[in-house]
Image (tube, rainbow, N blue to C red):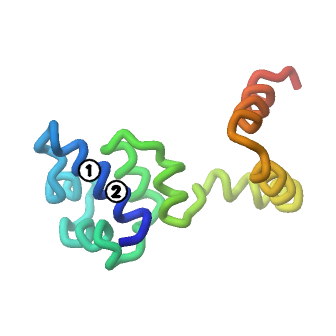
Amino acid sequence: MDAFGSYLRERREARRASDRSYSLRQLATRVGIEPSYLSRIERGAESPPSEATIRRLAAELEEDEDVLLALAGKVSSDLQDAIRRRPALFAQLIRQLAELPDHAVLRLVREVRDGDW
């Protein structure tokens, strides 16, 4: 199984353990896809769905949509737009951040978020 499908199945089954409404069929119905399609996705027999479907799955499963998108090999459209506006700067920023430990990235995020620009 691919990372997206196996993670999705794991999260759905974990929710189903305490709430039967998270069966494959019921979840698929709530997000507007066929149960057989969701089954193929979870087994890795189908490519991950569209960004919109991934967002609906994330909302239903109470998961971070950016995590699900990343596992699907996708980047949200709002981030794509930001990168397209300044591609060289964002490429350099991401490459530099990739080398930092998590605590340093989190500190930087807080500083940018709370900063007085």
- Quadrant where the N terminus sits is bottom left
Q: Left or right: where does residue 64 sit relative to residue 88?
A: left
Q: In which quarter of the image is residue 102?
A: top right
Q: Residue at x 22, y 50 (%)?
A: 13
Badge 1 amino acid: Arg
Q: Which mark is residue 8?
A: 2
Badge 2 amino acid: Leu
**Where is residue 74 drawn, in percent x and y?**
56, 63
Task: Name the element at disc 2.
Answer: helix
Task: Name the element at disc 1.
Answer: helix
**Where is residue 110 drawn, in percent x and y?**
73, 27
Q: Which residue is drawn at 40% across and 67% down?
A: 49
Q: In this view, does 62 lie above or below 74?
A: above
- Taking the view exactly as shown, the residue that stands out farthest to the bottom is 45
Q: Residue at x 75, y 53 (%)?
A: 98
Q: Left or right: where does residue 34 sit relative to residue 109?
A: left
- Taking the view exactly as shown, the residue that stands out farthest to the left is 20
Q: Residues within 10 Å of mark 2 (few under 14, many from 20)?
A: many
**Where is residue 66 drawn, in percent x and y?**
53, 49
- Taking the view exactly as shown, the residue that stands out farthest to the front is 101
Q: In this view, does 77 lie above or below 17?
A: below
Q: Which mark is residue 97?
A: none
Q: Mark 1 points at which residue?
A: 12
Q: Find out whether the residues at labels 2 and 1 contact each other: C-beta distance under 8 Å.
A: yes
**Where is residue 60 drawn, in percent x and y?**
31, 44
Q: How crowded is mark 1: few (under 14 residues within 10 Å), some or many (20 or more)?
A: many
Q: Is residue 112 above or below residue 84?
A: above
Q: Which residue is drawn at 29% across and 58% down?
A: 9
- Quadrant where the C terminus sits is top right
Q: Quadrant of residue 37?
A: bottom left
Q: In this view, does 43 lie above or below 31?
A: below
Q: Distance between the residues labelled 2 and 1?
A: 6 Å
